[in-house]
Image (tube, helix red, strand yellow):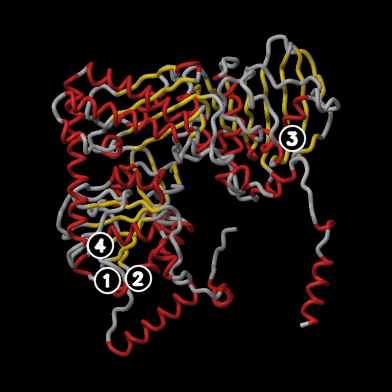
Amino acid sequence: MSDLFDNVAHNSQDYSAKDIEVLEGLEPVRRRPGMYIGGSDERAMHHLVAELLDNAMDEAVAGHATRIELELGVDDCVTVRDNGRGIPVDPHPKFKSKSALEVILTTLHSGAKFGQKAYTTSGGLHGVGVSVVNALADTLTVEVARDRKLYRQTYSRGKPQDKLKQTGGAPNRRGTTVVFKPDTSIFGKEAHFQPDQVYRMARSRAYLFRGVEIRWSCDTSLLKRGSATPATETLHFPNGLGDFLEASLNGRKTLTPEHFVDQAKFPDDEGHLEWAITWPNDEEGFVNSYCNTIPTVDGGTHEQGLRSGLLRSIKAYGELVGNKKKIAQVTAEDILGGACALLSAFIKNPQFQGQTKEKLANPMAAKLVETTIKDHFDHWLSGHPERARTLLDRILERADDRLRRRQEKELNRKSATRKLRLPGKLSDCSRNRPSGTEVFLVEGDSAGGSAKQARNRETQAVLPLRGKILNVVSATQDKIKANQEIADIVQALGCGTRATFDIEKLRYERIVIMTDADVDGAHIASLLMTFFYREMPGLIEDGRLFLALPPLYRLTQGSESVYARDDDHKDVLLKKHFKGRGKIEISRFKGLGEMPAKQLKETTMDPKNRTLLRVTLTDTTGAEAKQQRKQAEDLVERLMGRKPELRFAFIQENARFVADLDV
């Protein structure tokens, strides 16, 4: 026992004040970028552009800028320029040896957005945006045109490389220009800005503030052949969210010919609100909200206000026209469940959950939005009784359907034949019997959207999955049961797992795994096949599980296009199909989400044209089949199990078979 206490005493002496490290300046950002931009991957890298773009947007919203330029150049060089007031360059009163510009770029929680003197409403409220960009940039150059003079300073990884210098006069210029390149030691050499993603970011900001003009430009060498992203474009939308909604609908028919689109100021100069809502006939909707031009992907109090305002208004109208009993059962989900809604709030002192600002937390925002939406929706309904009645009938039908499903669920809970509820992301087919139906398990919401447009609604269902599902071989049963994606699959199929598996309860005749035709897609398909092999082996034994074969390339010559599954198939088509027939354009699909619905249908989903691979265990019987099944089990355990040394050994044993390794 004395030896034990001696060891404890010795160890405590090893831990002293010298072990306490204090991170200064921007070093915390470089050490832990995930705390500030949500990670250190390609997705997080795009957040740096958003931070600079939002700063420029704040100048526009405050009425000091009318134009923003966003340029994406080679080697991931990004330029953001505005014609606003320009960052102050005079000495800071607290840090007299530094200019205000250097303080803003090198000090966390510094800026002009903590009060309301410089900005009434702003998105960059934490004072860390541009300093975080600076900390994570390999190089950053800032140029300020202010008071008819031009100033410039250069930084690297958050540290100034020279003093702020006046480089000349600028009699006809004003504003701030930031040019930066991300630090590959943080994000890795494989991470790159995606032109389509940066373009969509710029386009959405232009929609959100109708007074701004965003000039987009991109080096043409960065654009993939066949890409819909333009090399240059001036983004200016005088109708704001109304234009955004029309673009999002993309020609889909709606329940009412007029959309509920308007804007209003909050009382006491608390900000203003803009919204655009409609109800498509296909009831495949979305709710996208923003605060001070920042996308709030997880919603928040302003979305709560939207739901409450619409609900109060529709209930008041329902009681007015004599549906008091039925309207009392309506919920906000009955109203917005099948709607396309865009909501943009501009408020003072917004409070977000986290620096990435994905959810608004201001309690007062809920009341402001609720009151504003209710007042305007009251006028919208009463001003057009015919469209109001049409919408009310739709909402009451959705409420009846919801209540009926709840009653069935309660009834079935008491019986032995309990009907499974369906996951919210599932777009089910209309046929009631399993015969001739199939469900597509699709990688991601973007690909899921394309698949929903491409499907045959009578016989084809689509269930989008979020990224890579859990590896069930190396996970505990508790983790498997708690995993949302797996739960959605089990609920959608309705046949249970393991001991509760019953092929007679399967809701579809076929299950089709449809992932991108690349390495990540193959990985996701492998995880899904592993899941079915372990949790629902009866599906494979009964021949119900399939792999879709989406094309990787499109080869076009004139008006003729053919599709290639992979590189080998592409080479065959080039040699045989197009032999000696002139110039051929080759487009590579990055993923299913980039493939237009029409092409996805004709190549991958239409039974007349597609090719499916059936997943099987063995074609033999008896002792040979038993041996093959044992080999399959050993292989799954070796490749997907908890022992990485087995996977390493497999790679070593099979490395000699790799003919061409793309690194």
Q: Give the label on residue 494, or none.
A: 4
Work out whether mark 3 precedes mark 1 in sequence or the reverse, and give the earlier one.
3
Question: Which amino acid does the dot numbered 1 rest on?
Answer: Phe
x, y (%) of residue 557? 38, 41
Q: Mark 3 near mark 1, Cβ–Cβ under 8 Å?
A: no
Counting the numbered discs, the total is 4
x, y (%) of residue 660? 55, 63
Q: Mark 1 near mark 2, Cβ–Cβ under 8 Å?
A: yes
Residue located beneath label 3 in the image: 107
Q: Mark 4 near mark 3, Cβ–Cβ under 8 Å?
A: no
Work out whether mark 3 precedes mark 2 in sequence or the reverse, and give the earlier one.
3
For the residue pair 116 and 134, the one nearer the viewer reads as 116
- Separation (CA) of disc 4 from disc 3: 55 Å
Going by the picture, which residue comes out furthest to the top? Answer: 171
Residue located at (19% from left, 23% from top) = 387
Q: Secondary structure at mark 2?
A: helix
